[in-house]
Image (cartoon, grey):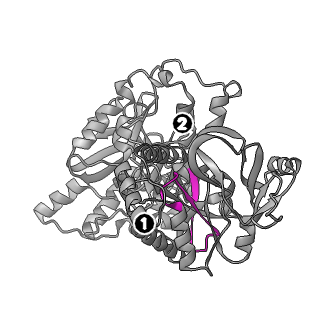
């Protein structure tokens, strides 16, 4: 251990040390007199003095300065609390010297324990964690010779504004630090510690956005985890899964809490809270239908071939055009099952058993579409449609054999999941433009989908693209202002409700440009590591 202030004084006076291996010398002396300790009281007294933590700290500091090595020295075996099975004396305080600039965050928070200030947590990657001189559980007695009292806010402020040499008198806990956990998560909500009234220390919080990837490095605190962005940077506090689940399950008006007391700054949660009422999930069907989107554990995988590419988005954003262009660009690599329905006009319909009022799903030919209606005179079974009885279709729907199904004019229509398996088994990536609800069925280790959201541009851009398509003969129907507005609104609803499934989002304001971005993403899958749900791996 080294004291910056002592080093500076020695440098000013240009003193030279006699030797720089006093710690080794003391260990040799203890070894030599080991057999005398039980027989000679003077030898026992000498051994006790040489083992004193204060004496050892002095020798280590002298050796560091003498050798001009100002890095943190390795712990002395004499200071090991298990050495000779001797317990550490309760008053064996240590002096720890650090150097910092004013305003620099040490990366440590405190709590009050039996009237004393104790280190509550050390942030991974922070200054204190890098030096390794302090540990969770250490009691802080003094800062630069001044007693710290029992207010964590006062201590935190004094350390933040301190500069130059800072000497802490501590009562060590000798707790072993935990190695960083290799747990990675994808965030499904935005978080700003500056606006969080519950966080014990706003300065120690880690800000993130939905879609960010974090490494969880410490989960000892049930309410506040430590995490850092996978791209790098210091660790910070984030709400734990449990805390955020509770927070999202509380009635909004009961989330308001009483102001945090001054003494709770950068410490554990304390103070009285207003009474909270939690939703009774067994009596609240609406709550049951919603997912608590917080963190999803993910794993980093080397490049591999995804089995399905799922394009989702509102009607009129160009999903089908992008799908067809991608298939035609490499028919040996891509394949598809043509969906059994297509949004075409505003009407009432039923999809996957749910009545909806919106863009009507109009039938279109599919490679493997089942229907309960009777075949027309010109139709043959297996050519465009597979005609089955209504009872058979209802049984298969109940058994979960359909990716999508719906009812139109009293007849059932659906696309079976087996049709996707047929494309995959043929060695191709199956491209699907499906209803967003179907992603829940596909997002498994069997289909390992890459989900791309095709976002609608502005209504004005949509109409301009439609006019260009009409002039070139690609489109035959003019898009009204109401149509364009509905497309934009539907796109926004899909993004709000299903963004946690997206691997990529593309705004289609230019078909060729968007197609180029999509092809580039497909090539990157072959060359770059991928983050996938951990359930796909284990």
Between disc 2 and disc 1, whose residue precedes? 2
Residue 45 seen in the figure: no
Q: Which residue is mark 1?
A: 511
Rendered residue at 39%/29% (across/down) = 264
**Position in image of residue 280 (x %, y %):** 66, 24
- Residue 155's place in the image compared with 413, above or below, is above
Screen quadrant of the N terminus: bottom left
Question: What residue is shown with label 2?
Answer: 243
- Specify the farthest residue to the left: 13
**Viewer-side residue, 47 vs 253:** 253
- Of labels 2 and 1, the one closer to you: 1
Residue range in magenta is 296-319
Name the quadrant containing residue 242. top right
Is label 1 in a helix, a strand or a loop?
helix
Rate crowding at label 1 as few (under 14), some (14 to 19) or many (20 or more) other CA atoms within 10 Å. Answer: some
Q: Is residue 310 magenta?
A: yes
Q: Is residue 453 left or right of residue 480?
A: right
Residue at the (43%, 42%) spot, across then down = 482
């Amino acid at each position: 251990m080294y004291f910056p202030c002592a080093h500076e004084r020695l440098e000013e006076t240009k003193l030279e040390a006699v030797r720089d291996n006093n710690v080794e010398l003391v260990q040799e002396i203890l070894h030599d007199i080991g057999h005398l300790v039980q027989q000679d009281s003077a030898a026992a007294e000498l051994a006790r003095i040489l083992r004193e933590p204060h004496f050892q700290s002095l020798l280590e500091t002298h050796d560091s300065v003498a050798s001009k090595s100002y890095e943190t020295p390795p712990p002395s075996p004499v200071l090991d609390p298990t050495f000779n099975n001797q317990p550490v004396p309760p008053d064996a305080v240590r002096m720890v010297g650090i150097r910092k600039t004013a305003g620099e965050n040490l990366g440590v928070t405190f709590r009050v324990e039996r009237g004393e200030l104790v280190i509550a947590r050390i942030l991974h990657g922070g200054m204190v964690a890098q030096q390794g001189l302090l540990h969770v559980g250490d009691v802080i007695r003094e800062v630069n010779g001044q007693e710290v009292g029992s207010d964590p806010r006062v201590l935190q402020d004094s350390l933040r504004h301190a500069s130059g040499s800072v000497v802490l008198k501590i009562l060590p806990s000798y707790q072993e630090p935990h190695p960083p956990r290799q747990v990675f998560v994808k965030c499904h909500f935005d978080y700003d510690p500056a606006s969080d009234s519950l966080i014990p220390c706003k300065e120690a919080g880690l800000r993130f956005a939905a879609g960010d990837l974090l490494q969880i490095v410490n989960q000892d605190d049930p309410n506040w985890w430590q995490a850092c962005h996978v791209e790098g940077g210091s660790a910070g506090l984030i709400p734990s899964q449990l805390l955020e689940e509770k927070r999202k399950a509380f009635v909004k008006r009961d989330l308001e809490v009483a102001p945090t007391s001054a003494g709770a700054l950068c410490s554990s949660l304390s103070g009285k809270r207003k009474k909270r009422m939690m939703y009774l999930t067994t009596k609240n069907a609406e709550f049951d239908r919603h997912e608590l989107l917080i963190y999803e554990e993910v794993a980093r995988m080397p490049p591999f071939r995804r089995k399905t590419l799922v394009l989702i988005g509102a009607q009129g954003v160009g999903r089908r055009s992008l799908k067809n262009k991608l298939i035609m660009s490499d028919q040996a690599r891509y394949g598809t099952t043509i969906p059994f329905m297509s949004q075409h006009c505003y009407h009432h319909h039923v999809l996957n058993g749910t009545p909806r009022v919106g863009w009507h799903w109009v039938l279109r030919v599919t490679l493997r579409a089942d229907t309960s209606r009777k075949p027309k005179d010109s139709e043959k079974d297996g050519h465009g449609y597979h005609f089955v009885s209504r009872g058979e279709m209802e049984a298969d729907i109940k058994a979960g054999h359909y990716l999508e199904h719906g009812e139109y004019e009293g007849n059932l229509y659906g696309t079976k999941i087996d049709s996707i398996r047929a494309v995959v088994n043929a060695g191709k990536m199956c491209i699907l433009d499906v209803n967003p609800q179907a992603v829940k069925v596909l997002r498994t280790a069997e289909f390992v989908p890459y989900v791309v959201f095709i976002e609608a541009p502005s209504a004005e851009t949509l109409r301009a693209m439609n006019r260009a398509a009409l002039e070139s003969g690609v489109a035959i129907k003019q898009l009204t202002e109401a149509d364009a507005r509905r497309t934009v609104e539907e796109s926004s609803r899909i993004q709000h409700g299903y963004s946690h499934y997206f691997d990529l989002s593309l705004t289609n304001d230019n078909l060729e440009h968007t197609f180029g971005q999509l092809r580039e993403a497909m090539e990157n899958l072959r060359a770059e590591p991928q983050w996938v749900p951990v359930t796909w791996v284990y």
